[in-house]
Image: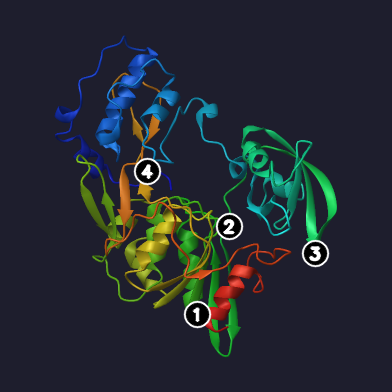
Amino acid sequence: MKTKIIPLLLVLLFCLGCRADEEAQPSFPEGTRQSENIWIKQQMERYYYWSTQLPKNPDYSLAPQDFLKSLLSKEDRYTVMVNPQDASTYPRSVRGLYGFDYTLSKAGGGTLPLITLVMQDSPASRTGLARGMFITAINGTPLSSANAATAAADMKNSTMLSLSVAEWQDGTLSAPKDVTIYYGYTFSQPLRSQIFEQNGRKAAYLYIYDFREGMGSMLLQTVTQMKNQGVHDLILDLRDNPGGSVAMAAALCAMIPEGITASTPFIKYAGNKNGGTVTKTFSEQIAYHPAAPPFEACRSSSLGLSRLYVLATARTASASEIVINNLRPYMQVVQVGDKTQGKDMAGFPVTDDRNPKQVPWELHPMIYKVYNAKGAGNYPNGLVPDISVAEDAELPMLPLGNPQETLLRAALRHAGY
């Protein structure tokens, strides 16, 4: 989930009356590491969900990113800080660098990285990587159950990968080949949709890679086409969706069930003593982002369903988890696959608003726990599936959208197709 999700009004509410509660800080010369860390500590006292757990006497001599880490709650997996002028300070991922993702799979007998996603027009796709390939060696090091997890996790720390990969054929790894991948840019991914029909009933399948801010018109157009085709069921594939804009996720949610209105509550944000609790309706959450389709347009394209299938894995996180949890008060949501990642938190970016700016860092603290309209939330260990199916239960792994692919087939069968 991108952290810029709360309206400016909520930021202002944080600022009212909270300065008096901040602890007295030591004084250091402007421009020093220590002065930057003082600013970081002040913002964390004001906004951080776990502000009462902050250490009383932290080491202000640490490098700023190390200082931030020294403040974090043991429950916090997501707070980060970046310098917009220094790309090396941003979080790194295999997906972001190379355009593919993987899971550690035991399906082949031992534990090896299994490629689950190759993004279109990415460095990975241009070298011939494909969903379903096993990685057998990384940068010349053969992989085994003993070293696969560590070696795979280290891939994000390199700007070039030499991989040995193999395909699963007739119960064994075969067709080995070596590929070299250089990090590079991957464009936004398109929506994937199709219709399955049986005995006069139609099930729509919609794969959404992430909830990027500019997807509103494409999302509205796709769902409108589904409505015009008279679909009876929707299977939403969020297995690779790490989140993004909550406004876009709310817009999608408004297009699916029957019976909601502009004043129907969608989400509750619960923060520290400064942030308090804030509830947003469907229309209010959608309206936060100007590129999101208006609530009225979402409802005019509504499928009017009473049941939704969502395909999910441990790569399903943040705004995509909100879709699952926050639609449950209004319809039956059948989660198929594995437990989700468990990012039940939200926030917004915090920068130095002094003039002139003294601190270059952009802080992304976890500020709120998120809940649905019935108060259900608190899922740091992930949302548990209703139909538990391992994505790699059957090999070879089939392409996304193939009706015989493991998760999609399970959903279609449960829906009666």
Q: Which residue is mark 3?
A: 171
Give the mark nearest the N terminus, 2 or 4.
Answer: 4
Lower position in the chain sequence, tag 3 or tag 2: 3
Q: From mark 3 to mark 4, how far is it between C-alphas?
A: 47 Å
Q: Is residue 151 left or right of residue 37?
A: right
Callout 3 touching callout 4 (CB < 8 Å):
no
The amino acid marked with disc number 4 is: Lys
- Name the foreground residue: 289 vs 111: 111
Identify which residue, 106 or 274, lies in the foreground: 106
Q: Picture coordinates of residue 346 (x, y %)? A: 36, 46
- Which of the numbered marks, if any, corresponds to residue 190? 2
Q: Amino acid at mark 1?
A: Val
CA–CA distance in space, label 3 to label 1: 38 Å
Q: Nearer the viewer, residue 241 or 371?
A: 371
The residue that label 4 is drawn on is 4
Of labels 3 and 4, earlier in sequence is: 4
Residue furthest bottom as drawn: 199
Q: CA distance from mark 2 to mark 4?
A: 23 Å
In the rendered structure, which disc, 3 or 1, sits on the residue that comes first in sequence?
3
Mark 3 vs mark 2, CA separation in Å? 33 Å
Q: In this picture, is 152 found above or below 341?
A: above
